[in-house]
Amino acid sequence: MTTTSVRLPIFFALIISASIAPMRVAHADNSLRYSLPWQLRPVTIDDGARVDAAAAAFNDPQGNFDVALSTMFATSYKVTDHWAPLLRLGVISNNAPGAALDGSSFVNPVVGATYARREHNYRFALTLATTIPIGMGGGDAPDPRVARTNAAASTARPADQAMFEVNYLTESVGVAVAYVGHGFTAQADAMLHQGFRVRGSEAADSGGGARTSGAVGLHLGAFIGSHISVGADLRYQRWLSEPTIMAAADTTTIAIGPRLHFRIGKEMSIHPGFSLSRGIDARGLDAPLVTSQATTVQLDLPVTF
């Protein structure tokens, strides 16, 4: 099992800690009192970066215990008060049953842009994005360990599934609306993904030449004091084209956890958080902790400048 996925967030955190150590932590203001979602896109745009590491446990299609590790890095640049381009990269690894099946992968990058507006306590964001189909494990004869790792990551992180479909160029459009006020955040989100096969034949994974999926989500968050918030997400994703490769047509995931909010000096703010997410199948919350849908621990570090 590779250690790449855990080195990146540790290295990134050490750099930030070293650079901000001599600076003074200022009091939080209203601009920090937005509760960042775990699985949904934020409705704010900033100059900044975000790195998160996640470990997910689940049962594979044969019922074996599997663990997938992932590190995602995202960055955006605020061109105007309303527009910001974005870039998202991912490195994943899989601790499959039997060492011969372990693997790692660099997945499809995502590029796009977000348009955001704010009217009093209400915020609106429109996101347009596309994957770049250069991820490892594509084509007609992929390395089986890499292909299995990509499939495991789709189970572990359904919100980032387009990044793991390395044979497809996926166009995405999303809309998010949020109320932010009095230390409380309520956000609704909808996303549509359209994938087009650009690598390998249709027989490579039985996914067809095109595939469509949609997702909706809800985030609720509240501040406890000036620098601590607690937030929860509920996200539902469904395959609209229902490709035969998918064992299930839909996925429901809930995530919850605390987050800290600090301003460092005049320009920088950090929002480290920890969440636990769980896939919910037909048995609901009464299902065992580890099922065919993943239970995931996530460490998240967004930094804005």
Image (cartoon, grey):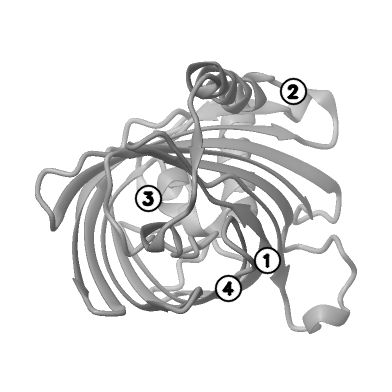
Viewer-side residue, 118 vs 29: 29
Q: Position of residue 7 (x, y in %)?
A: 63, 20
Give the alpha-carbon distance from disc 1 to disc 2, as whole Å.
Answer: 28 Å
Which residue is tagged 4? Answer: 222
Which residue is tagged 2? Answer: 1
Which residue is tagged 1? Answer: 256
* Element type where label 2 sits in the image: loop
Which part of the image, by quadrant, shows the C terminus? top left
Disc 3 versus disc 1: nearer the observer: 1
**Looking at the rendered structure, which numbered label has been put on residue 202?**
3
* Element type where label 3 sits in the image: helix
Q: Amino acid at mark 3?
A: Glu
Q: Amino acid at mark 1?
A: Ile
Give the alpha-carbon distance from disc 4 to disc 1, as whole Å.
Answer: 12 Å
277 left or right of 291? left
Compared to residue 209, the image places residue 180 above or below, namely below
Disc 4 versus disc 2: nearer the observer: 4
Give the alpha-carbon distance from disc 3 to disc 1, as whole Å.
Answer: 38 Å
